[in-house]
Image (spheres, rainbow, N blue to C red):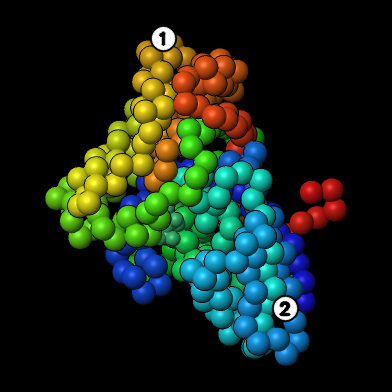
Amino acid sequence: MQAVAIAHPNVALIKYWGKRAIAGNLPATGSLSLVLGGLSTETLVRFEAGRQGDRVLLDDREDAETSARVTACLDLLRREAGVQDGAVVESRNDFPTGAGLASSASGFAALLVAAAGALGLRLPAARLAEIARTGSGSAARSLLGGIVLLNNRDATTDCTQLAAPADWPLEIVVAVTATGQKAISSRQGMAMSEQTSPYYPAWVDSHAADLEAGVAAVRNRDFRSLAELAEHNCLKMHAVMLSTRPPLIYWTPATLACLQRVRALRAGGLPVFFTIDAGPQLKAVCLPEAADEVAAELSAIDGVCQVLRSPLGAGARLRANGD
Ligand code: 2P0
């Protein structure tokens, strides 16, 4: 009744910001993402016979909101397995938590795989993705590795791997500009945008075209088109955030300085583009030959406190010997 799983966060190039329905946590749009193999969450789940309730430790701390979301996911798995035992969950990230690095995506992907493993459940991938989505909409994307498309039709979430890590070995350089937890979570922020941003309807209406073009760019290994499109989609999402009331301003001055530097490097011929999520970190996506120079350039910017490097990674999995 115990298992340990490893999962990696992901970064979306065509993003998810807004929900079609609160019930089941259904995203308003699909999304396209890269799995960051250099950053990891490791989660142990142990179901204890006769235990009432769950105990959830994230980086050794208990938090009521996280615990409630974890229990809701575990309840769905318990129902599938026909058991009622409570669980002890211990999860650790080797990167800053709740700071715009998608720790909820890797966290819920690892939780699901560990809990299903502990219960001996073999669920269809689509059902696992649906349960992961209830914990965190972006978590379904971390169940698979490499470059992942999350399609969102009706009430189902189906994820497809568009490229394995070796098919298109992109490298991601993360410029960390602040490590504190963000004041407004993605979940709260997107609800505010849906209700108050005049640009939210245009964001949703223009999304399918971005997603289709993004998928085509990945299939054609067309870095230049993907770069232009991903930066456009990112800035469009931030335009929605900025036009929310009250405004959602996730950037620091260093985030903007990194953005300008990446644009200048690409204008000078280096294969790199940026993306930024609901947090102050900038992720620079590079062809491998550009990564050393991009990392050095971003490290030198005032306000950048850490630079992390990551290849594309594998999907969530049970920990095997040697992992
Ligand atoms: C993304 N984000 O596509 C976008 C970009 C944040 C900015 O997916 O409410 O933390 O739990 O489903 O999973 C954040 O999504 O939100 C997210 P919930 P989650 O990567």
- Expressed as whole percent of the image width and height from the top left, the position of residue 228 reads 34, 27
Image quadrant where residue 92 sits: bottom right
Is 71 on the left-hand or right-hand side of 100?
A: right
Query: Where is mark 1, residue-wise?
Result: 268
Determine whether the residue tagged by mark 2 lies in a helix, strand or loop. strand
- Expressed as whole percent of the image width and height from the top left, the position of residue 155 reads 37, 70
Image quadrant where residue 51 sits: bottom right
**Distance from mark 1 CB to nearest ligand 1 atom below 8 Å:** no
* Residue at the limit of the structure toward the right, as seen here: 321
Mark 2 nearby-residue class (10 Å; few <14, some 14–19, many ≥20): many
Determine whether the residue tagged by mark 1 lies in a helix, strand or loop. loop
Is 317 on the left-hand or right-hand side of 322?
A: left
Mark 2 residue type: Phe
Residue 76: numbered disc: none
Disc 1 to disc 2, C-alpha distance? 55 Å
Mark 1 residue type: Gly
- Expressed as whole percent of the image width and height from the top left, the position of residue 278 reads 39, 46
Q: Is residue 105 above or below residue 129?
A: above
The answer to whether residue 113 is visible is: no
Q: Is label 1 in contact with label 2 (beta carbons under 8 Å)?
A: no
Mark 1 nearby-residue class (10 Å; few <14, some 14–19, many ≥20): few
Residue nearer the viewer, 28 or 100: 100
**Distance from mark 2 CB to nearest ligand 1 atom below 8 Å:** no
Placement of the N terminus among the 4 image quadrants: bottom right
The residue depicted at 69 percent of the width and 64 percent of the height is 90
Residue nearer the viewer, 86 or 156: 86
Image quadrant where residue 54 sits: bottom right
- Expressed as whole percent of the image width and height from the top left, the position of residue 279 reads 42, 43
* Residue at the limit of the structure toward the left, as seen here: 198
Residue 47: numbered disc: 2
Mark 1 / mark 2, whichever is N-terminal: 2
Is 25 on the left-hand or right-hand side of 66?
A: left
